[in-house]
Image (cartoon, rainbow, N blue to C red):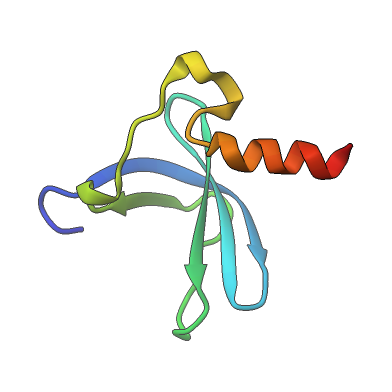
Amino acid sequence: LPIGHNRIYGTVTDVSYTGVSTQYLVETPWGQSIIAFEQNSIVRDRCELGDPVVLGWAPEHTFGLDPAEGLNAGLDHAVLELESDTEA
């Protein structure tokens, strides 16, 4: 990873081939699970269960959520209203 990029270390706990990508479930050292996707555009070895991995991303792709919003943090409230209208 380039210097300055965010990184989280973890262990692969599940691998699912989904056609165009492979989905990985990664457990962090503090017990949180993170879902990561890798495009299947390059043929190479894939991670396997138990592999140690480093998840990384550029700082400009990071944003914070307001914990006071609970499960709706980061969601567009107009979209939530539209979805509730279609369920009624």
- Up-down relation of residue 69 to residue 55 (above or below): above
Q: Which of 23 and 85 is in front in this view?
A: 85
- Up-down relation of residue 46 to residue 7 (above or below): below
Q: Nearer the viewer, residue 83 or 42?
A: 83
State the image coordinates of residue 51 (x, y, percent, origin top left): 48, 53
- Up-down relation of residue 31 to residue 68 (above or below): below
Residue at image location 32% in from the left, 38% down from the top? 63
Residue at image location 48% in from the left, 86% down from the top? 43
Residue at image location 34% in from the left, 31% down from the top? 64
State the image coordinates of residue 35 (x, y, percent, origin top left): 54, 48
State the image coordinates of residue 25 (x, y, percent, origin top left): 57, 48
Q: Residue farthest to the left?
A: 3
Q: Residue farthest to the right?
A: 88
- Looking at the rendering, in which quadrant would you find the N terminus? bottom left
Q: Report which quarter residue 24 is drawn in.
A: bottom right
Q: In this view, does 79 lie to the left or right of 39?
A: right
Q: Report which quarter residue 78 is drawn in.
A: top right
Q: Residue farthest to the top?
A: 68
Q: Which of 41 and 29 is in front in this view?
A: 41
State the image coordinates of residue 31 (x, y, percent, origin top left): 51, 26
Residue at image location 40% in from the left, 28% down from the top? 65
- Looking at the rendering, in which quadrant would you find the C terminus? top right
- Total labels drawn: 0
- Up-down relation of residue 67 to residue 6 (above or below): above
